[in-house]
Image (cartoon, rainbow, N blue to C red):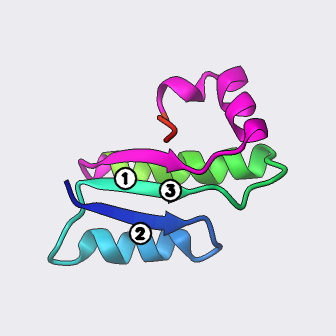
């Protein structure tokens, strides 16, 4: 299965749009969240927005490198069921 890795930088949404619009469409998108050391509401919102865009395009999404704080926030908000972590 082809995987596209996408870091959570400010230009991530534009990059995702460009990659999904291209001729080779990934079937699995791994959001690289390892750099999110102190996650907050804005981080969860950005992750959620990207995940929705990936799913609407018909692809799978996973979070890669989530630290303990982000995993806890995902669990507390119920997003851990919608966003698998590897």
Residue 26: image x %, image y %? 24, 62
Disc 2, disc 1: CB below 8 Å?
yes
Label 3 element class: strand
Measured Cα–Cα span from mark 2 to mark 3: 10 Å
Residues rendered magenta in the picture? 56-82
**Residue lying at 66% horizontally and 56% vertically, measured from the top left:** 34
Instruction: Please state if 76 lies on the left or on the right of 82 as rendered.
Output: right
How many C-alpha atoms fall within 10 Å of the one at disc 3: few (<14), some, or many (≥20)? many
Residue, disc 3: 31
Residue, disc 2: 16
The answer to whether residue 84 is above or below residue 15 is above
Residue 84: image x %, image y %? 47, 35
N-terminal of the two: label 2 or label 3? 2
Q: Which mark is residue 54?
A: 1
Instruction: Please state if 31 lies on the left or on the right of 23 as rendered.
Output: right
The answer to whether residue 31 is above or below residue 39 is below
Label 2 element class: helix
Instruction: Please state if 53 lies on the left or on the right of 35 as rendered.
Output: left
């Amino acid at each position: 299965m082809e995987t596209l890795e996408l870091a959570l930088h400010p230009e991530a949404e534009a990059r995702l749009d460009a990659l999904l619009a291209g001729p080779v469409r990934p079937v699995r998108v791994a959001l690289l969240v390892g750099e999110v050391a102190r996650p907050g509401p804005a981080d969860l919102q950005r992750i959620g927005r990207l995940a929705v865009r990936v799913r609407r395009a018909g692809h799978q999404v996973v979070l890669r490198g989530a630290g303990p704080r982000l995993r806890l926030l995902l669990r507390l908000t119920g997003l851990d069921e919608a966003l698998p972590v590897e």
